[in-house]
């Protein structure tokens, strides 16, 4: 698909992948995998998904939480809250986010910079 946008809820799907843009959705949750998308942005909440990986950009989202793994993404930036996720690893750039907190493991990322608040994480 080219664009997934302006939906109220996107949930309980097995795979959401190879889309050009996923944006301006209210809730994206309880999906198994979100991967190989070009842009994921301006969504209100992205939560309780199992895997978010190999996406090019994840930006300007309000809340990203309760994700099991966020890995191998190129850019994660300008999001408001990234919290209560289990694993955040092997991402290239994590920057200019407002808060990154209460995550269990943040490791093997290339660059983590210019974030406003990073606190109460278990392992970095």
Image (cartoon, rainbow, N blue to C red):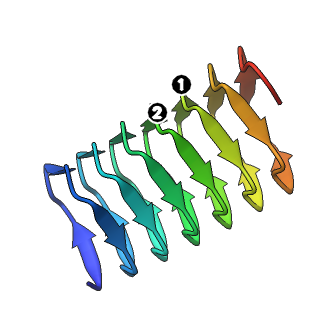
Dot 1 alpha-carbon crowd within 10 angstroms: few under 14, some 14 to 19, many 20 or more: many
Query: Does residue 114 appear left or right of residue 22 in this picture?
Result: right
**Residue, disc 2:** 65
User: Foreground residue, 102 or 58?
Assistant: 102
Quadrant position of residue 3: bottom left
User: Foreground residue, 62 or 37?
Assistant: 37
Query: Does residue 88 appear left or right of residue 5 in this picture?
Result: right
Dot 2 alpha-carbon crowd within 10 angstroms: few under 14, some 14 to 19, many 20 or more: many
**Residue drawn where x is 65% and y is 30% of the image:** 100
Residue 9 badge: none
Quadrant position of residue 7: bottom left
Give the percent coordinates (x, y) of residue 63: 43, 36
**Residue, disc 1:** 84
Dot 2 or dot 1, earlier in sequence: 2
Screen quadrant of the C terminus: top right
Q: Secondary structure at mark 1?
A: loop
Whether label 2 touches label 1, CB < 8 Å: yes
Give the percent coordinates (x, y) of residue 11: 20, 49
């Amino acid at each position: 698909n080219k664009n997934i946008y302006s939906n109220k809820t996107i949930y309980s799907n097995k795979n959401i992948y190879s889309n050009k843009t996923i944006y301006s959705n209210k809730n994206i949750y309880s999906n198994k995998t979100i991967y190989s998308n070009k842009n994921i942005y301006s969504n209100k909440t992205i939560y309780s998904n199992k895997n978010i990986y190999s996406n090019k950009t994840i930006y300007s989202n309000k809340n990203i939480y309760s994700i099991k793994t966020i890995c191998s993404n190129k850019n994660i930036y300008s999001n408001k809250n990234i919290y209560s996720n289990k694993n955040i690893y092997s991402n290239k750039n994590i920057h200019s986010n407002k808060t990154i907190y209460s995550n269990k493991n943040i490791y093997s990322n290339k660059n983590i910079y210019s974030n406003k608040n990073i606190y109460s994480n278990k392992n970095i």
